[in-house]
Image: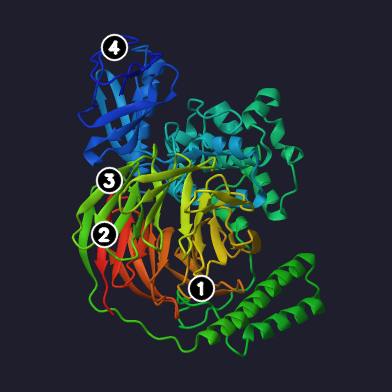
Amino acid sequence: MICCLNPDCSNPLNPNGKKFCQSCNTPLVSLLRNRFRVIRVLSDEGGFGRTYLSEDVDKLNERCVIKQLAPKFQGTWSQKKAMELFAEEAQRLQDLGEHPQIPTLLAYFEQDGCLYLVQQFINGDNLLKELQQRKAYNAREIQSILLDLLPILKFIHDRKVIHRDIKPENIIRHKSDGRLSLIDFGSSKQFTAKVQQKSGTSIGSHGYSPLEQIRDGKAFPASDLFGLGATCFHLLTGNSPFQLWMESGYAWVSNWREYLRSPLTPELDFVIDKLLKKDIQERYQSADEVLRDLTPKQLLALPPAGKSSGKIPPTRAPSLPKSYPLLRILILISALILLFGFGESWYKHLRQIQTSLFSRLSQHNSLGKDQALLGQPPKITLGEVSLVNTLQGHESSVLSVAISPDGKTIASSGGDNTIKLWNLATGKQISSLKGHSQQVNVVAISPDGKTLVSGSDDNTIKIWNLTTRKLIRTLAGHSDSVHALAISADSETLVSGSDDNTIKIWHLTTGEQIRTLLGHTFWVRSVAISPDGVLLASGSFDKTIKIWNLTKGYSIRTLEGNSQTVTAVAISPDGKTLASASRDVYDGQRLRTIKLWNLVTGREIRTLAGHANTVTTVAFSADGKIIASGSRDRTIKLWNPATGEEILTLTGHTNTVTSVTFNPDGKTLVSGSEDNTIKIWRLSQ
């Protein structure tokens, strides 16, 4: 199909080969600037142009977004202002696009009397659409949203830019890992001294933009923070600030608590109230101020173990010296408080310190028991590690890779809606399987090597004969994208996880749905089955890991050690250890974490930290001696799970590493990436 670029065209899609639009007779453009193929309209900008979903043919048809400016009233003040804002938006994206949660500017040009801005496509739903689907957010989810967005606002404010239109529609959650991106910098403006002293044009959205911005045209960092508070209010209550503004102006910000469905924690209540202050002087002035109030306060910093430099080794669980000197300090402080009576607030702080200390001591003792069971762990050293092949053939991101039990075949899936089979030894493509109508998020091969299973954004699971490469059947039952698959060791049971928040268990041979597991409150993006087929682990964007009895279908326990979305889970070959990856940041060091758990007791064993961005995938080697992890930082790390030590970092991918898997012999590692490639690494011990 060819999309007409006339912003007034009522039916812009046309069959291929047409030279003029069948609806409005406008000449059709197959490629903008001989590079960008427009697919369809995403939104209409009210006569000033449209926003289109497009493909960049110079980058293997990678999806992108094109904003068009085609003002009707040439030479008018509104046309001049629109062009000025459009150019400013391009400049802002050029300056700010280095941030991973802000779209990157790809191109800015004029063609056929229109201006075009091309930017990175963020694959996901905005928070307004998400709210419409799920109806409400709880306090914990709102705090997570704040912690995700505030560093972005700090980033743009540090560069003297204010967004001026913070609202749910301009915040998109990535489908891949749940992180939030801030979009639409069309209203953004430099807050130089000149701008601050001069009243400007009122830009923003009523209800979400504060009084100083709507009435006076002035905007400051505190103005964006009001928009953030209004966004949180909307998500918490389901009430649109715009509708409330239409009814009573800004009166709602004084009684916002009346709209709550349930009380908030005192800390979050205080933060949102201060974000929503009508008077800018009473409001937060910087993102850092909000972050300080969202972060638990402690009067005493817990001293790290290990080196005198004060840095905790990131791959080891924090511990306390046997003498526990902090307890002595705690007792001393307690005595002083009792003696001099510093008041109720000091008592509350004391309780916080006590809770933190005793939790730390408890963790230290429990970790010691688990580590004692492991005995004296061996140190692992790898010999030469080499990149032996890079497989190219997917036209879009490679989202999943799997290796057959005989170690001869790689299966891969991606955003181009295909599944590809490769000869691992030669790197040659064997076959390309087509059947899904949308991107294929995950593939799995049965332990008996006979069956290939795929899950897709089209909400279906397809079962393929791996030998004949023929489609056996399609499983329909999920109501949203399928992102996770696992097959039992006896090749009889299939487990699937979906964005409909459910887990389904199927009989692999017959395709019969056995049961549906309910319990997660957000997307289920990873599942793993224990080698004995008894236990199932699932990781969700609700920040929990659940352990289930697979044969009976009931939940055994919930692991809640993650403060951010859980992106991947894997179970060791001996069935004793669970590895989970999440977007958690380790101990304030901005390193993302992998946690190891005792699968039987649910107790956390240790934390591995080293990736600079979200960990997207984890896998155990066949002997369980090595864990591989892939990340948005474009690297693969190899770890010793027995000690928590980082063995090696592999670099070579130029975009997010989405999937890693070991060959059964443990000598080969295969990785897939959003750079559209698969890499084969040779390991030797």
Query: What residue type is disc 4 on?
Result: Thr
Left of 670 or right of it: where is 333? right
> Where residue 432 is drawn, which disc sits there?
3
**Residue 671 picture quarter:** bottom left
Left of 24 or right of it: where is 540? right
Between the residue at mark 1 and the residue at mark 3, the CA separation in whole angstroms equals 34 Å
The residue to which callout 1 is attached is 575
Q: Is residue 598 above or below residue 400?
A: below
Q: Nearer the viewer, mark 2 or mark 4?
A: 2
Query: What residue type is disc 2 on?
Result: Lys
Query: What residue type is disc 3 on?
Result: Ser
Between the residue at mark 1 and the residue at mark 4, the CA separation in whole angstroms equals 64 Å
> Where residue 679 is drawn, which disc sits there?
2
Other residues around mark 3 within 10 Å, as few (<14) / some (14–19) / many (≥20):
some
**Count of marks, rendered view:** 4
The residue to which callout 4 is attached is 26
Other residues around mark 2 within 10 Å, as few (<14) / some (14–19) / many (≥20):
some
The answer to whether the residue labelled 2 contacts the one labelled 3, judged by CB atoms less than 8 Å apart, is no
Between the residue at mark 2 and the residue at mark 4, the CA separation in whole angstroms equals 46 Å
Q: Nearer the viewer, mark 1 or mark 4?
A: 1
> Where residue 327 is drawn, which disc sits there?
none
Residue 79 shows in the view? yes
Sequence order check, earlier mark of 2 and 3: 3
Q: Secondary structure at mark 2?
A: strand
Sequence order check, earlier mark of 2 and 4: 4
In front of the other: 7 or 529: 529
